[in-house]
Image (tube, helix red, strand yellow):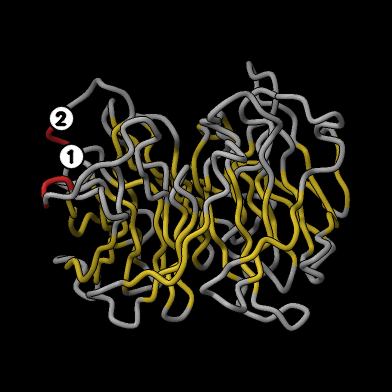
Amino acid sequence: MVSASNTKHIGHIDCPGGGQVWVDGNILYIGHMRPPSGTTLVDISDPRNPRKITTIDVPVGWHSHKVRAKDGLMIINHERFGNEGPADFGGGLAIYDTSKPDRPKLISKWLTGGKGVHRYDYDGRYAYISPTAEGYVGNIVMILDLIDPVNPVEVGRWWIPGQWTAGGEEYPWHDYVTPRCHHPLRMGNRLYVSYWHHGLFILDISDMSKPTLISHVNSSPAFPHPTHTCLPIPQPLKGRNIMVVADEDVAKLRPHAPSFTWVYDITDETNPLPISTFQVPGIDPDGAPQPPMTGCHQPSERFKGSIIPFAWFAQGLRLVDIADPFAPKEVGHFLPDAPAGADQASSNDVTIDDRGILYLIDRIRGVDIIETSVF
Protein backbone atom coordinates (compact mmCIF):
# COMPACT_ATOMS: atom_id res chain seq x y z
CA MET A 1 0.00 0.00 0.00
CA VAL A 2 1.28 3.46 -0.86
CA SER A 3 0.36 5.28 2.35
CA ALA A 4 -1.94 5.19 5.36
CA SER A 5 -2.65 7.28 8.44
CA ASN A 6 -4.86 6.20 11.37
CA THR A 7 -6.04 3.30 9.21
CA LYS A 8 -5.23 -0.41 8.92
CA HIS A 9 -5.89 -2.65 5.92
CA ILE A 10 -7.54 -5.85 7.17
CA GLY A 11 -9.04 -7.48 4.09
CA HIS A 12 -9.56 -7.39 0.34
CA ILE A 13 -12.21 -8.65 -2.06
CA ASP A 14 -10.90 -9.38 -5.54
CA CYS A 15 -13.83 -8.54 -7.79
CA PRO A 16 -14.68 -6.37 -10.79
CA GLY A 17 -14.69 -2.66 -10.02
CA GLY A 18 -17.81 -0.84 -9.09
CA GLY A 19 -19.84 2.24 -8.47
CA GLN A 20 -21.23 1.67 -4.98
CA VAL A 21 -20.86 -0.40 -1.82
CA TRP A 22 -23.48 -0.75 0.91
CA VAL A 23 -23.79 -2.79 4.11
CA ASP A 24 -26.94 -4.25 5.62
CA GLY A 25 -26.46 -6.62 8.53
CA ASN A 26 -23.50 -8.88 7.78
CA ILE A 27 -23.82 -8.56 3.99
CA LEU A 28 -21.78 -6.23 1.80
CA TYR A 29 -23.58 -5.32 -1.42
CA ILE A 30 -21.37 -4.34 -4.37
CA GLY A 31 -22.74 -2.62 -7.47
CA HIS A 32 -20.33 -3.25 -10.36
CA MET A 33 -19.42 -0.77 -13.05
CA ARG A 34 -19.28 -2.93 -16.16
CA PRO A 35 -21.41 -5.77 -17.50
CA PRO A 36 -21.79 -8.67 -17.30
CA SER A 37 -21.06 -8.23 -13.58
CA GLY A 38 -24.08 -6.63 -11.93
CA THR A 39 -24.36 -6.97 -8.16
CA THR A 40 -22.29 -9.14 -5.78
CA LEU A 41 -23.27 -10.10 -2.24
CA VAL A 42 -20.45 -10.81 0.22
CA ASP A 43 -20.62 -12.23 3.75
CA ILE A 44 -18.58 -9.92 5.99
CA SER A 45 -19.31 -11.59 9.32
CA ASP A 46 -15.54 -11.90 9.54
CA PRO A 47 -14.27 -8.82 7.67
CA ARG A 48 -10.76 -10.27 7.59
CA ASN A 49 -12.06 -13.21 5.62
CA PRO A 50 -14.90 -11.97 3.39
CA ARG A 51 -16.81 -14.66 1.55
CA LYS A 52 -18.51 -14.08 -1.79
CA ILE A 53 -22.04 -15.44 -1.81
CA THR A 54 -23.50 -14.74 -5.24
CA THR A 55 -23.45 -12.37 -8.20
CA ILE A 56 -26.38 -11.17 -10.30
CA ASP A 57 -25.35 -10.53 -13.91
CA VAL A 58 -26.67 -7.96 -16.40
CA PRO A 59 -26.57 -7.99 -20.21
CA VAL A 60 -24.07 -6.08 -22.31
CA GLY A 61 -25.16 -2.47 -22.81
CA TRP A 62 -26.54 -2.08 -19.27
CA HIS A 63 -25.09 -1.77 -15.81
CA SER A 64 -26.36 -1.94 -12.25
CA HIS A 65 -23.57 -0.03 -10.57
CA LYS A 66 -25.64 1.29 -7.65
CA VAL A 67 -27.21 -0.73 -4.84
CA ARG A 68 -29.09 -0.06 -1.62
CA ALA A 69 -30.46 -2.64 0.80
CA LYS A 70 -32.43 -2.69 4.02
CA ASP A 71 -34.05 -5.50 6.02
CA GLY A 72 -33.83 -8.11 3.29
CA LEU A 73 -34.90 -5.89 0.40
CA MET A 74 -32.30 -4.91 -2.21
CA ILE A 75 -32.74 -2.25 -4.88
CA ILE A 76 -30.39 -2.07 -7.84
CA ASN A 77 -30.41 0.34 -10.77
CA HIS A 78 -30.50 -0.57 -14.44
CA GLU A 79 -28.94 2.14 -16.57
CA ARG A 80 -27.71 2.26 -20.16
CA PHE A 81 -23.96 1.66 -20.43
CA GLY A 82 -22.91 2.00 -24.05
CA ASN A 83 -24.98 1.48 -27.17
CA GLU A 84 -24.88 -2.29 -27.54
CA GLY A 85 -27.05 -4.95 -25.98
CA PRO A 86 -30.78 -5.61 -25.76
CA ALA A 87 -32.90 -2.45 -25.78
CA ASP A 88 -35.85 -4.34 -24.30
CA PHE A 89 -33.95 -5.04 -21.05
CA GLY A 90 -35.08 -1.55 -20.06
CA GLY A 91 -33.80 1.03 -17.62
CA GLY A 92 -35.22 1.36 -14.13
CA LEU A 93 -34.98 -0.30 -10.71
CA ALA A 94 -34.87 -4.02 -9.97
CA ILE A 95 -36.18 -5.02 -6.54
CA TYR A 96 -34.97 -8.24 -4.89
CA ASP A 97 -35.78 -10.25 -1.81
CA THR A 98 -32.40 -10.96 -0.22
CA SER A 99 -33.64 -12.48 3.02
CA LYS A 100 -31.76 -15.57 1.76
CA PRO A 101 -28.60 -13.86 0.49
CA ASP A 102 -27.37 -16.91 -1.40
CA ARG A 103 -30.61 -16.95 -3.40
CA PRO A 104 -31.69 -13.41 -4.29
CA LYS A 105 -35.20 -13.44 -5.67
CA LEU A 106 -36.40 -10.82 -8.17
CA ILE A 107 -39.66 -9.36 -6.87
CA SER A 108 -40.36 -6.74 -9.52
CA LYS A 109 -38.79 -4.32 -11.94
CA TRP A 110 -39.94 -0.73 -12.15
CA LEU A 111 -39.30 0.61 -15.64
CA THR A 112 -38.64 4.16 -16.70
CA GLY A 113 -38.27 5.58 -20.17
CA GLY A 114 -34.90 6.36 -21.74
CA LYS A 115 -31.55 5.64 -20.15
CA GLY A 116 -32.85 4.50 -16.75
CA VAL A 117 -31.97 5.34 -13.14
CA HIS A 118 -28.62 6.61 -11.88
CA ARG A 119 -28.17 7.00 -8.10
CA TYR A 120 -30.77 7.09 -5.30
CA ASP A 121 -31.57 7.01 -1.60
CA TYR A 122 -33.73 4.39 0.14
CA ASP A 123 -35.11 4.51 3.69
CA GLY A 124 -36.86 1.14 3.92
CA ARG A 125 -40.10 2.33 2.36
CA TYR A 126 -39.49 5.17 -0.08
CA ALA A 127 -36.86 5.36 -2.79
CA TYR A 128 -35.69 8.82 -3.87
CA ILE A 129 -34.39 8.32 -7.37
CA SER A 130 -32.93 10.08 -10.42
CA PRO A 131 -34.61 8.57 -13.50
CA THR A 132 -34.97 9.64 -17.06
CA ALA A 133 -38.68 9.89 -17.85
CA GLU A 134 -40.82 10.07 -20.96
CA GLY A 135 -41.32 13.66 -22.09
CA TYR A 136 -38.47 15.11 -20.00
CA VAL A 137 -34.98 16.19 -20.99
CA GLY A 138 -32.34 14.72 -18.68
CA ASN A 139 -32.85 13.07 -15.28
CA ILE A 140 -35.44 14.31 -12.79
CA VAL A 141 -36.31 13.76 -9.11
CA MET A 142 -38.85 11.03 -8.36
CA ILE A 143 -40.19 9.39 -5.18
CA LEU A 144 -41.36 5.76 -5.24
CA ASP A 145 -43.36 4.05 -2.51
CA LEU A 146 -42.14 0.46 -2.05
CA ILE A 147 -44.46 -0.55 0.78
CA ASP A 148 -45.61 -3.24 -1.67
CA PRO A 149 -42.36 -4.08 -3.48
CA VAL A 150 -44.26 -6.13 -6.04
CA ASN A 151 -46.06 -2.97 -7.14
CA PRO A 152 -43.91 0.16 -6.70
CA VAL A 153 -45.96 3.35 -6.94
CA GLU A 154 -44.74 6.79 -7.92
CA VAL A 155 -45.92 9.30 -5.33
CA GLY A 156 -44.16 12.47 -6.48
CA ARG A 157 -41.74 14.06 -8.92
CA TRP A 158 -39.90 17.33 -9.33
CA TRP A 159 -37.82 18.85 -12.10
CA ILE A 160 -36.22 22.13 -13.09
CA PRO A 161 -38.78 24.14 -15.07
CA GLY A 162 -37.80 23.68 -18.71
CA GLN A 163 -37.09 19.95 -18.50
CA TRP A 164 -40.70 18.91 -19.21
CA THR A 165 -40.71 19.66 -22.91
CA ALA A 166 -43.70 17.36 -23.53
CA GLY A 167 -45.66 19.59 -21.19
CA GLY A 168 -44.93 22.62 -23.31
CA GLU A 169 -42.08 24.01 -21.21
CA GLU A 170 -39.52 25.96 -23.20
CA TYR A 171 -36.09 24.35 -23.01
CA PRO A 172 -33.54 27.15 -22.30
CA TRP A 173 -30.22 25.27 -22.09
CA HIS A 174 -29.32 24.66 -25.73
CA ASP A 175 -25.86 26.17 -25.18
CA TYR A 176 -25.26 24.57 -21.78
CA VAL A 177 -25.13 21.13 -20.19
CA THR A 178 -28.38 19.14 -20.11
CA PRO A 179 -30.00 19.20 -16.63
CA ARG A 180 -29.34 15.97 -14.80
CA CYS A 181 -30.50 15.04 -11.32
CA HIS A 182 -27.62 12.99 -9.94
CA HIS A 183 -29.36 11.85 -6.77
CA PRO A 184 -31.51 13.08 -3.90
CA LEU A 185 -30.76 12.37 -0.22
CA ARG A 186 -33.50 12.61 2.38
CA MET A 187 -33.30 13.98 5.92
CA GLY A 188 -36.59 14.64 7.69
CA ASN A 189 -39.03 16.28 5.33
CA ARG A 190 -36.31 17.60 3.04
CA LEU A 191 -34.59 16.30 -0.06
CA TYR A 192 -31.06 17.51 -0.72
CA VAL A 193 -30.59 17.16 -4.44
CA SER A 194 -27.43 17.28 -6.54
CA TYR A 195 -28.11 18.35 -10.13
CA TRP A 196 -24.75 18.03 -11.89
CA HIS A 197 -23.75 21.28 -13.66
CA HIS A 198 -27.02 22.88 -12.53
CA GLY A 199 -25.96 22.89 -8.89
CA LEU A 200 -27.91 21.88 -5.79
CA PHE A 201 -31.52 22.17 -4.70
CA ILE A 202 -33.23 21.82 -1.32
CA LEU A 203 -36.80 20.55 -1.64
CA ASP A 204 -39.63 20.42 0.91
CA ILE A 205 -41.34 16.99 0.76
CA SER A 206 -43.79 17.49 3.62
CA ASP A 207 -46.31 16.63 0.92
CA MET A 208 -44.49 13.98 -1.11
CA SER A 209 -46.95 14.32 -3.95
CA LYS A 210 -45.88 17.94 -4.42
CA PRO A 211 -42.19 18.55 -3.69
CA THR A 212 -41.57 22.30 -3.51
CA LEU A 213 -38.40 24.32 -3.96
CA ILE A 214 -36.80 25.95 -0.93
CA SER A 215 -33.49 27.08 -2.41
CA HIS A 216 -30.98 26.64 -5.20
CA VAL A 217 -27.23 27.29 -5.46
CA ASN A 218 -24.92 26.67 -8.40
CA SER A 219 -21.13 26.99 -8.21
CA SER A 220 -20.76 26.02 -11.87
CA PRO A 221 -19.48 27.26 -14.28
CA ALA A 222 -17.26 29.42 -12.02
CA PHE A 223 -16.01 26.08 -10.66
CA PRO A 224 -16.42 23.79 -13.66
CA HIS A 225 -17.02 20.49 -11.86
CA PRO A 226 -20.49 18.91 -11.56
CA THR A 227 -22.29 18.79 -8.21
CA HIS A 228 -22.29 15.11 -7.22
CA THR A 229 -23.66 14.71 -3.68
CA CYS A 230 -25.44 16.92 -1.12
CA LEU A 231 -25.03 15.29 2.30
CA PRO A 232 -26.95 16.88 5.20
CA ILE A 233 -25.48 16.46 8.69
CA PRO A 234 -28.12 15.39 11.24
CA GLN A 235 -26.67 17.23 14.26
CA PRO A 236 -25.74 20.93 14.52
CA LEU A 237 -22.03 21.75 14.42
CA LYS A 238 -20.84 24.91 16.17
CA GLY A 239 -24.51 25.83 16.50
CA ARG A 240 -25.09 25.71 12.74
CA ASN A 241 -26.98 23.33 10.43
CA ILE A 242 -24.51 21.93 7.93
CA MET A 243 -24.49 20.27 4.51
CA VAL A 244 -21.42 18.72 2.85
CA VAL A 245 -21.43 19.07 -0.94
CA ALA A 246 -19.05 17.03 -3.08
CA ASP A 247 -18.13 18.04 -6.62
CA GLU A 248 -17.05 15.17 -8.88
CA ASP A 249 -13.75 15.34 -10.74
CA VAL A 250 -15.20 14.39 -14.14
CA ALA A 251 -17.06 16.15 -16.98
CA LYS A 252 -15.25 19.42 -16.38
CA LEU A 253 -16.50 22.32 -18.44
CA ARG A 254 -12.88 23.24 -19.10
CA PRO A 255 -9.42 22.09 -17.96
CA HIS A 256 -9.14 22.83 -14.27
CA ALA A 257 -7.53 21.92 -10.98
CA PRO A 258 -9.04 18.88 -9.20
CA SER A 259 -12.50 19.12 -7.67
CA PHE A 260 -13.00 19.39 -3.91
CA THR A 261 -15.78 19.35 -1.34
CA TRP A 262 -17.73 22.31 0.03
CA VAL A 263 -19.20 22.83 3.49
CA TYR A 264 -22.45 24.84 3.48
CA ASP A 265 -24.25 26.54 6.35
CA ILE A 266 -27.95 25.80 5.83
CA THR A 267 -29.22 27.22 9.12
CA ASP A 268 -31.25 29.54 6.90
CA GLU A 269 -32.14 26.94 4.34
CA THR A 270 -33.54 29.56 1.99
CA ASN A 271 -30.01 30.94 1.66
CA PRO A 272 -27.34 28.19 1.73
CA LEU A 273 -23.90 29.73 2.25
CA PRO A 274 -20.52 28.07 1.61
CA ILE A 275 -18.40 28.54 4.72
CA SER A 276 -15.38 26.36 3.92
CA THR A 277 -13.89 23.84 1.52
CA PHE A 278 -11.65 20.80 1.81
CA GLN A 279 -9.04 19.57 -0.63
CA VAL A 280 -6.58 16.73 -0.09
CA PRO A 281 -3.34 18.34 1.13
CA GLY A 282 -0.67 18.61 -1.56
CA ILE A 283 -2.86 17.28 -4.37
CA ASP A 284 -2.16 20.27 -6.62
CA PRO A 285 0.25 22.80 -5.08
CA ASP A 286 0.12 25.32 -7.93
CA GLY A 287 -3.55 25.00 -8.93
CA ALA A 288 -2.72 23.78 -12.44
CA PRO A 289 -5.23 21.78 -14.48
CA GLN A 290 -5.08 18.05 -13.73
CA PRO A 291 -6.53 15.00 -15.50
CA PRO A 292 -10.06 13.88 -14.60
CA MET A 293 -10.46 11.50 -11.65
CA THR A 294 -7.64 13.13 -9.71
CA GLY A 295 -9.85 14.85 -7.15
CA CYS A 296 -13.07 14.40 -5.18
CA HIS A 297 -15.83 11.91 -5.89
CA GLN A 298 -18.17 10.75 -3.13
CA PRO A 299 -18.65 11.01 0.65
CA SER A 300 -19.98 8.02 2.51
CA GLU A 301 -23.71 8.45 3.02
CA ARG A 302 -23.17 6.75 6.38
CA PHE A 303 -20.73 8.24 8.86
CA LYS A 304 -20.03 8.52 12.58
CA GLY A 305 -20.25 11.83 14.43
CA SER A 306 -18.48 14.60 12.56
CA ILE A 307 -16.00 12.43 10.61
CA ILE A 308 -16.94 11.89 6.97
CA PRO A 309 -15.19 9.15 4.97
CA PHE A 310 -14.63 10.14 1.32
CA ALA A 311 -13.74 8.19 -1.80
CA TRP A 312 -11.35 10.66 -3.43
CA PHE A 313 -10.57 8.96 -6.78
CA ALA A 314 -6.75 8.88 -7.18
CA GLN A 315 -6.27 9.91 -3.53
CA GLY A 316 -8.06 6.88 -2.05
CA LEU A 317 -9.92 7.07 1.25
CA ARG A 318 -9.84 10.38 3.11
CA LEU A 319 -11.30 10.82 6.61
CA VAL A 320 -12.42 14.43 7.06
CA ASP A 321 -13.47 15.84 10.43
CA ILE A 322 -15.97 18.71 10.18
CA ALA A 323 -16.48 19.18 13.94
CA ASP A 324 -15.48 22.76 13.19
CA PRO A 325 -17.34 23.24 9.89
CA PHE A 326 -15.45 26.47 9.27
CA ALA A 327 -12.15 24.55 9.27
CA PRO A 328 -12.49 20.92 8.11
CA LYS A 329 -9.37 18.81 8.60
CA GLU A 330 -8.11 15.42 7.49
CA VAL A 331 -7.68 12.95 10.37
CA GLY A 332 -6.77 9.82 8.43
CA HIS A 333 -6.32 8.34 4.99
CA PHE A 334 -5.67 5.12 3.10
CA LEU A 335 -4.26 5.11 -0.42
CA PRO A 336 -4.42 1.68 -2.08
CA ASP A 337 -2.17 0.47 -4.83
CA ALA A 338 -3.43 0.95 -8.35
CA PRO A 339 -5.19 -2.15 -9.71
CA ALA A 340 -3.26 -4.26 -12.20
CA GLY A 341 -3.09 -2.47 -15.55
CA ALA A 342 -4.13 0.91 -14.13
CA ASP A 343 -1.91 3.94 -13.60
CA GLN A 344 -3.51 4.99 -10.33
CA ALA A 345 -6.18 4.08 -7.83
CA SER A 346 -9.74 5.08 -8.71
CA SER A 347 -11.60 5.00 -5.40
CA ASN A 348 -15.24 5.34 -6.37
CA ASP A 349 -17.31 4.81 -3.24
CA VAL A 350 -16.99 4.04 0.46
CA THR A 351 -19.36 2.92 3.19
CA ILE A 352 -19.15 1.96 6.85
CA ASP A 353 -20.70 -0.82 8.93
CA ASP A 354 -21.98 -0.82 12.50
CA ARG A 355 -18.53 -1.88 13.75
CA GLY A 356 -16.90 1.19 12.22
CA ILE A 357 -15.19 -0.84 9.48
CA LEU A 358 -14.85 0.84 6.10
CA TYR A 359 -15.32 -0.66 2.64
CA LEU A 360 -13.62 1.18 -0.23
CA ILE A 361 -14.33 0.12 -3.81
CA ASP A 362 -12.10 0.87 -6.77
CA ARG A 363 -13.77 1.76 -10.06
CA ILE A 364 -11.49 -0.69 -11.91
CA ARG A 365 -11.12 -3.63 -9.55
CA GLY A 366 -11.42 -4.67 -5.92
CA VAL A 367 -12.76 -3.69 -2.50
CA ASP A 368 -10.42 -2.87 0.37
CA ILE A 369 -11.58 -3.44 3.96
CA ILE A 370 -10.14 -0.94 6.41
CA GLU A 371 -10.13 -0.35 10.14
CA THR A 372 -9.61 3.10 11.58
CA SER A 373 -8.79 4.46 15.00
CA VAL A 374 -10.47 7.84 14.50
CA PHE A 375 -14.05 6.87 15.38
The residue lying toward the viewer, choosing from 82 and 73, is: 82
Q: How many marks?
A: 2
The residue lying toward the viewer, choosing from 34 and 207, is: 207
Q: At 50% across and 47% down in the image, what residue appears?
A: 20
Q: Is residue 84 above or below residue 233?
A: above
Query: Does residue 14 appear in this view?
Result: no
Which disc is residue 87 wearing?
Answer: 2
The answer to whether 203 appears left or right of 217 in the picture is left
- The residue that mark 1 highlights is 90
Quadrant of res 314: top right
**Which structural element holds mark 1?**
loop
Quadrant of res 146: bottom left
Quadrant of res 75: bottom left
Q: At 60% across and 56% down in the image, what residue appears?
A: 245
The answer to whether 215 appears left or right of 295 in the picture is left
Q: Could you tell me the amino acid type at mark 1?
A: Gly
| x and y percentages locating residue 69 in the rendered image | 41, 62
The residue lying toward the viewer, choosing from 363 and 255, is: 255
**Which structural element holds mark 2?**
helix
| x and y percentages locating residue 356 in the rendered image | 70, 66
Q: Is residue 314 above or below residue 237?
A: above
The answer to whether 50 appears left or right of 257 in the picture is left
Query: Does residue 219 appear in this view?
Result: yes
